[in-house]
Amino acid sequence: MTAEIIDGKAFAARVREQVATHVAKLKEENDLTPGLAVVLVGEDPASQVYVRSKGKQTVEVGMKSVEHKLDVDASEAELLDLIDQLNTDPTIHGILVQLPLPKHLDEDLVINSIDPAKDVDGFHISNVGLLGTGQKSMVPCTPLGCLMMLRDYHGDLSGMNAVVIGRSNIVGKPMANLLLGDSCTVTVAHSRTKDLPDVVRGADIVVAAVGRPEMVPGDWIKKGATVIDVGINRIPAPEKGEGKMKLVGDVDFTSAAKVAGAITPVPGGVGPMTIACLLANTLTACCRSAGLPEPSGLTA
Ligand code: NAD
């Protein structure tokens, strides 16, 4: 058996198209342009790449994009003051503070100072609580992207056994809550889980969010299962030449693709969906703030 490849790149392009169409309609019918502000503290090279890419895609779908760059030694007061201004700016509907923050800044305090209605990352404690209690919230982008791909592939997820490997606040836990919301039977596995291979073998859906290159081999996967690989790991690729690197997921793609029914590749799977969902969340936040109907299929 060879798994069907779930093409996250193509899916993300469709999501962006849907967002762009809705943004154009909002402009025409309501004279309203969704705005996303991204705040970057310091000069972490990976964060700079992410922020540039977010800004570019925001503009491409017709939204307003604003970037705020603060020095690596910016004070907490300075950052909170900026967030305060963005919270009250009527042209800004989404605020994203790029993580990780420099060590001297209290990440929880900063995230919880964002207006929950503008918290397009879905990390504010209010949104976490709303999601955990099955209420309308802003949903973290990466798990939202995974859910969209699973719904698209399966339709109804109800009654399926899902195993989420990883219990982080940004991926594992919200993913588990989303799958529960779609009536899956959910197991959350983590670094202390006993007999992980056996736990994974019972799953119709496997979501791997660990950060360990190719740790899930094909013989852990149940025949026909759907595998969503969130991991992004950079490893040496001597086959490409000396000093070259490549990206791999948390799943050993070659062996898993022989048994799975469907699988997301790395790169080109979950990754592109994350920014597409950020744009979707910004649009959703804008519609909610104006009391307008939300676009369908872009929220949990
Ligand atoms: P994290 O380090 O916060 O959490 C990792 C989790 O894995 C922890 O809960 C830990 O208990 C679990 N874990 C560690 N070792 C384990 C083991 N041996 N067996 C079982 N569980 C184990 O990581 P994160 O932020 O959730 O990210 C996970 C991966 O997903 C990383 O590779 C990250 O780069 C990637 N990621 C990708 C996207 C994307 O857009 N595609 C977004 C976020 C994170």
Image (spheres, helix red, strand yellow):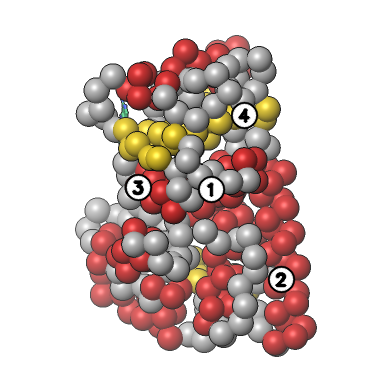
Q: For the residue labelled by badge 3, is the local secondary structure a helix, a strand or a loop?
A: helix
Answer with mark 2 or mark 1, whichever residue precedes in sequence: 2
Q: Which residue is mark 2?
A: 22
Tell whether 11 sits left or right of 77: right
SS class, disc 2: helix
For the residue labelled by badge 4, is the local secondary structure a helix, a strand or a loop? strand
* Structural crowding at the residue carrying mark 2, measured as other residues with C-alpha within 10 Å and reported as few (<14), some (14–19) or many (≥20): some
> What distance separates the C-alpha of mark 3 from that of mark 4?
23 Å
Residue sitting at 56 percent across and 31 percent down?
226
Q: Position of residue 250 (x, y in %)?
A: 45, 27
Badge 4 is on which residue? 262
Q: Is residue 103 left or right of residue 233?
A: left
Select label 2 or label 1 by which is in front. Answer: 1
Element assignment for label 1:
helix
Rounded to the nearest angstrom, the CA distance separating label 2 from label 4 is 30 Å
- Residue 170: x %, y % from top left: 38, 50
Residue shown at 72%/62% (left/top)?
Answer: 18
What amino acid type is highlighted by mark number 2? His
Give the spatial CA distance, label 3 vs label 2. 30 Å
Q: Identify the residue under disc 3.
A: 173
Residue type for callout 3:
Lys
To which quarter of the image does residue 242 belong? top right
Res 79 quadrant in image: bottom left
Q: Which residue is mark 1?
A: 147
Between residues 231 and 126, which one lies in front from this camera angle?
Answer: 126
